[in-house]
Image: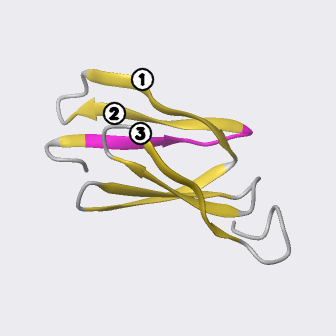
Amino acid sequence: MAGTDLLVLNGGGSGGISEYTTAGTTVNASLISGLNGPVGLAVVGNDLFVVNSGAGSIGEDTTSGATIIAELIPAPGGPNVCG
């Protein structure tokens, strides 16, 4: 959750993150897009951490969708080792 909204991971090859109210109303269907095989996310304060298994990394964004660091933690060994 980000505030009172839900963040939903849209997995797959070029996935993203959508934002909805707890009533199911779409706030932003493309809050974050262009992710490479996203498989997990965590919210800490106003920061959002996303595991991109296709890229083999963890990125950091804000809960408003702005990229802070696209590849905060690169995975040793390259792609497909984070999932």
Q: Is residue 79 above or below residue 63?
A: below
Q: CA distance from mark 1 to mark 3?
A: 15 Å
The residue depicted at 42 percent of the width and 23 percent of the height is 29
Q: CA distance from mark 2 to mark 3?
A: 14 Å
Residue 21's quadrant in the figure? top left
Quick check: 54 left or right of 30?
Answer: right
Dot 2, crowdedness within 10 Å: few (<14), some or many (≥20)? many
Quick check: 16 left or right of 3?
Answer: right
**Magenta-colored stretch includes residue 5:** no
Check disc 2 and report the residue beneath it: 19
Check disc 3 and report the residue beneath it: 66
Which of the labelled discs sits on residue 1, or is there none?
Answer: none
Indicate which label's residue lies in the foreground, 2 or 3. 3
Check disc 1 and report the residue beneath it: 29
**Magenta-colored stretch includes residue 11:** yes
The residue depicted at 17 percent of the width and 29 percent of the height is 23
- The local secondary structure at tag 2 comes to strand
Q: Which amino acid type is marked by label 2?
A: Glu
Q: Earlier in the sequence, mark 2 or mark 1?
A: 2
Q: Earlier in the sequence, mark 2 or mark 3?
A: 2
Determine whether label 2 and label 3 are within 8 Å by CB: no
The residue depicted at 55 percent of the width and 37 percent of the height is 16
Residue 54 lies, in percent from the top left, at 76, 53
Q: Nearer the viewer, residue 57 or 13?
A: 57
- Give, as a single range, the part of the protein colored magenta: 6-13
Q: Which amino acid type is marked by label 3?
A: Ala
Residue 19 lies, in percent from the top left, at 33, 33
Q: Which amino acid type is marked by label 1?
A: Ala
Dot 1, crowdedness within 10 Å: few (<14), some or many (≥20)? some
Quick check: 23 left or right of 76?
Answer: left
Q: Earlier in the sequence, mark 1 or mark 3?
A: 1
